[in-house]
Amino acid sequence: MPQPIESSEASKNKRLDIQGLRALAVVLVLCFHLGLPVSGGFIGVDVFFVISGFVITSMLEREWLANGHIRISRFFVRRFWRLTPALATVVSVTMIFGAAILSAYGPQRLMILTGTGAMLLGANAVIAKTTGGYFDTAADTNPLLNTWSLSVEEQFYIGFLLVLIIGWALGRRLPRPRVVVVTFVLALFADSLAMAMFAQPGHALDQPNWLFHFYSPLNRAWEFAAGSLLALFAWKLSEIPMRIRNIAGIVGLGLISYSAFFIAEGPAWPGLWTVIPIVGTCLLICASAEKTSNLYRILGSRFAVYLGDRSYSLYLWHWPVIVILSYCQISRLTQIVLALMVTAVLTIATFRWIETPLRHRRHSSKSAATLLALIIFGTPLVFAQVVNVALEHKYWNGNIKSQAKATGRFPITHRHGCEHRISRLNRAESDCAWNLAARGTPIYFLGDSNAAQYSDGLIIAAKQTGHPLTTAIALGCPFLVTPYKQPDRDPMYSGCSKVSTETHTWLRRQPRGLVVISNTDLYALVPTFRVIRSSQPGSVGANQYLSLFEKTVHTLAREGFKVAVISSPPHFDRRIPTLPSKYYWDLERCDLSSELANNCKKSMPIAVADMVQKDYRAALSELTSQPGVALVDVSRAFCSKTECPTQIPGLQIYRDGGHTTVAAAVALIPKFVETIKQMTPGH
């Protein structure tokens, strides 16, 4: 998170190269968020953390050496006037424009919660619990997502201030007083780095708790500590020969460049790869320690310093502008150009009329300063509550109320906690089971979220036909009897194969009956969803999902079960590479004006739906052609002869780009009843 430049007595100690390094970091982040070919541009935030550790520790050490103590209240007052005015401005303006433009079905709620969290120093925790991962799709609609790093940095201020003060205080009594504080920071560096490494996918600390992942200050403190250690040894940097510093500068630039262009986004961040940009940043700080160095002249150039001085405002503004413009019906190139122009204007204005005047404000009475601080702090919170009231009342609009009601109701399996990645072996017999007293042939409903979307309809159909039904649904996990792996997916799904095979073990112990399977066809349509056998070495290989699913159906049939396979609905999902972008649809991507007018809907020509699903539907038809196996093809249940809509009069069919609503599942009850009767004759 870029930090505003220091003023007054600190300005004479300001290193212009640090401002240039800030400029480099913010440009990397900006390019990454604009979707430019800088796959690792997000490392700019890690660069900022190192810079902050260096600058804050240097500032505090100067005060300690000059006065023998740190005035804690003065430190935080200065932090407030440097950080909060610009933040409050961005949050307030984003609330106004976000309320007018963003979708009322999620993004506005995320904006309210994140903005409030940012003002209360906890945006990282809020985002981790509401938006999900930094690289997740939901993050793209949160206009204040970038405030997470500001909250992390402010949390660093609290923690490191205490560590440094205690270290310096204890070191007073030693011949070498610096040893204690260096030891403390080194210990913090080592502990935090170890935590980041052990929190990698598949390791000891790989847990759902957000404190072990991307947004946590605990496994990022080592980045701040790296800069802090440089500051504590700054007096030694000038002793490094110029030739060595020049080499260090070249290596540092190389590491940053490699990170920017070759490191890719993923859940294993921060981790082992994070060491590369951190080391690169440290080398650059060391290399430019003397004004006579070549690197200092580059990073300390007029343009680099100009951009670095404004990096804080630039960082704050760029992401809200990008998100809000993404809701406008304009080309991608136009979005990028407009985002750059609007961000530049807002950055210059904020630096000129918000940051600078309040940072250099004239001395006023304590009561006047307190009142101004309260106004600055409270204004975005008031805006957030105003938007929240409007959102709670669905903007007093009937269309939003009805669509919110239809899409906000989750499947019965979700409401009963039956979609977690837990095998049936680890559930009680009565858990996630319905109509157990019925004497009909037992029904076992297996699959992923594709199955969950149909659960209300199938459960009611089972009750109407007198059959007990047990579910074994795991979100994101295809049910397959063969152990498998999905090498291109998020490691959070690495346990899917175990859940699947254990569920099959449980199923073999049950009375024979009807097994209903519904896996999404995305495993065949989306390259990153590909499935290969666990026994296959490495992660290379063609997608084996269809052959493994065919084996699953045939295995269950040989084991004495009747099998019914429910197909997927047509997809409006942007993850499908063969789907033209004009047919993408997601409730959260609609702007407020379209929602107010009930225009948040889309229709896809049936020819396009066939083009995307034709091969998969044909494969399903073939593998379900054997005796005792049936295909429940509901893929065109809500389509006309010419198109497949997301909504028809009186029925909201979809709740997102790939899942139907509970109301749609209920509308399929007659089809499910017909299938159950067909597959359980004589009942």
Image (spheres, rainbow, N blue to C red):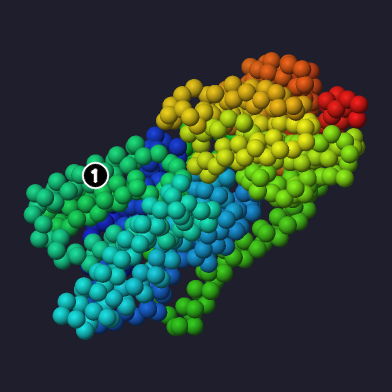
Above or below: residue 168 compared with residue 442: below
Q: Residue at x 41, y 71 (%)?
A: 158
Look at the numbered disc 1 and give the secondary structure of its residue: helix
- The residue that label 1 is drawn on is 253
Q: Residue at x 38, y 38 (%)?
A: 38
Quarter of the image with the C terminus is: top right
Q: Along the line of sight, which residue is nearer the eye, 596 or 630?
A: 630
The quadrant where residue 552 appears: top right
For disc 1, the neighbor class at 10 Å (few under 14, some 14 to 19, many from 20) is: some
Side of 466 where 205 appears, left or right: left
Any part of residue 230 in sight = yes
User: How many badges with numbers are in the image?
Assistant: 1
Query: Foreground residue, 210 or 314?
Result: 210
Where is residue 283 shown, x and y percent of the image? 22, 52
Q: Nearer the viewer, residue 494 or 107?
A: 494
Considering depth in this image, is 519 or 131 the residue closer to the camera? 519
